[in-house]
Amino acid sequence: MTLHEAMADVLRECGAPMKSRDLADLINVRRLYRPKSGKPLGASQVSARARRYPQLFEREGELIRLL
């Protein structure tokens, strides 16, 4: 599963916008995505991916929403 797929799954399941830190924490706990480095997923990676996929995610200040 890719990071943006994991983000979409969690946001769809929660049904509400989330902060990147909270989103990263849930993805880590559920082990939906692990960076190639093997380190836990960081909030900055989630934030960057949301910016990279504007067709999937909308940013509202600190919150990320699934479109």
Image (cartoon, grey):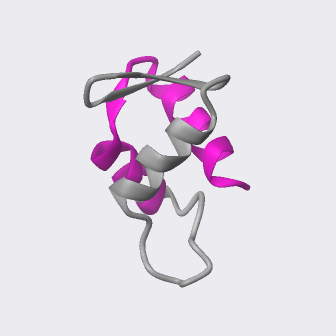
Residue 27: in magenta span: yes
Picture residue at 53% right of the left edge, 83% below the top? 38
Residue 54: in magenta span: no
Q: Quadrant of the N terminus?
A: bottom right
Give how far across and how far down residue 11 sits, in percent: 50, 29
Residue 63 vs residue 31: left or right? left
Picture residue at 60% right of the left edge, 34% below the top? 8
Give how far across and how far down residue 2 sits, in percent: 70, 54
Picture residue at 62% right of the left edge, 52% below the top? 3
**Rendered view: 47 above or below 57:** below
Q: Quadrant of the C terminus?
A: top right
**Rendered view: 58 above or below 10:** above
- Which portion, as a residue range, is magenta? 1-28
Give how far across and how far down residue 21 sits, in percent: 29, 49
Residue 13 vs residue 2: left or right? left
**Quadrant position of residue 32:** bottom right
**Rendered view: 3 above or below 12:** below
**Depth check: 51 or 40 in front?**
51
Q: Main secondary structure of the magenta part?
A: helix
